[in-house]
Amino acid sequence: MKKLTLISTALLATTVLVSACGNGEEAAPADKGTSGEKVKLTIWHNWSGQDAKAVAMRKILDDFQAQNKDIQLEIEGLPTDGLKTRLKTVAAANEMPDLFVMWPDAMTKEFVSGNLLQPINEFLDSKPEWKNNFIPGAFDGYTVDNNIYSVPMNLSPTSFIYYNKALLDQYKVAVPKTWDELMAAVKTFNDNKIIPIALGNKANWAAQSTIFSGLADRMTGSDWFLKAAKQDGVKFTDPEFVQALKKLQELSNAKAFQDGFNSIDQNQMRQLFYQGKAAMFIDGGWAMADVVQNAPKELLANTHIALMPSIAGGKGDPQSTSGVVGTGLGVSKKITGAKKEAAQKLFYALAGPEGQQATLNSSTLVSYKIELDPSKANPLFVELNDLMKTTKITPVYDAKLNSAAVEVINNGLQELLMGGSAEAIAKKIQDSQAASLGK
């Protein structure tokens, strides 16, 4: 889960270059769709990999183009971090693509505040059988002042332990259900020269989203965090939050992660697991589409998932994972007429019932009411789907904090994992969030 800052001074210098790569604003004839001209529509997405979800979404785009000869798609697929950087840049210049993958809560609110999005209420209301089939609360992260700006195209729980049961059995390690059991597992695997937990934190959101948001909730509980985010009577310098930071640092100090974890990405992290070099990795539900598509068959058969362990004395619910409803599609404020109609048609192809079914078929959870057919799904995805039926979703930090504070916590966690002071990092987070709220 991974959010944006609307204006970044460092990125403003590149705005002209990025905008020149294509922002979706075309000449009037294409916009009008008259005289036989095609409507040109730009869409930016993060389905650039070879995981099952990305493959499925790209197929929808290809099929849409083949079936709609009057619409010319200008498609740009970027890795998630690259997409966020590009969106950040064009947002600062008010040059958004026509359609683009975006995230709920913080990003949506900032884009609305920047007058960059148009609501989809009328479009959604015109298809009640679609609108009414989303899970309760699905639109919350995309709603600002009673206007809905997107719908989720998936469901994104962010924190699961993916583990190689063959390795756990080989070294007589139980699936860790408590913090002490996790620390004992770390020691056993280190003693046997196996990476206990592979980590790819090159993109600084990773440790925050996939590990810390869930771990911190175990310590503080969700109510405390939501109050801290609003600066409502509690602070990020409070003892329970500092203790959560120290718990994460405890993992690092115990060599739970391989050397150089801040210099590799999540794909490289999963490769360590696929190669049998790591016993576990911690990642979101979105990783499932990559695991079932790209893990070696023998390893896949031995891969299972578990929740983060409970922490003694913690105030959070151990039967929970941090998460949000999934990414949605933003519609540029600028598009009208034939271009807007084309955008709505593509929006529905990707996020409507058929798109939701294609997403579920790609071993990706959805925020839409569809029953999974276990006979047609990978057993590991069935395991995840069943686990979510009894698992509560708690807040992800980067979905609720101001984007400036998100950067502070993301960078702070990288520093913490390299030996930084938990108290000093907590103060930076507190100061940033308080400043963003004028407190």
Image: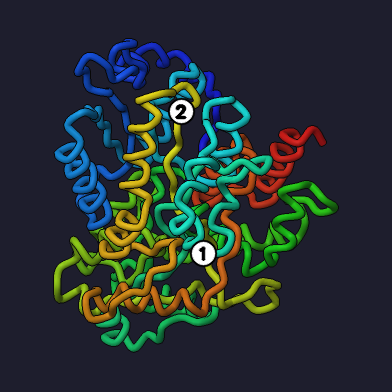
**Which residue corresponds to the image point at 31% horizontal and 54% vertical from the top-left?**
355
Q: Taking 386 as reference, is 250 above or below it? A: above
- For this rendering, which residue is in front, 53 or 150? 150
- For this rendering, which residue is in front, 301 or 149? 149
What colour scheme has been applied to the protein in the rendered image? rainbow
- At label 2, the amino acid type is Ser
The residue pinned by badge 2 equals: 332
Quarter of the image for residue 146 reads top right
Of all residues, the one furthest to the right in this rendering is: 233
- At label 1, the amino acid type is Ile
Q: Which mark is residue 31?
A: none
Q: Which mark is residue 135?
A: 1
Q: Position of residue 202 (x, y in %)?
A: 38, 44
Q: Position of residue 141 (x, y in %)?
A: 57, 49
Q: Taking 300 as reference, is 243 above or below it? A: above
Give the quadrant of the C terminus.
Answer: top right
- Relative side of 178 to 35, left or right: right
Pick whichever of labels 2 and 1 is earlier in the sequence: 1
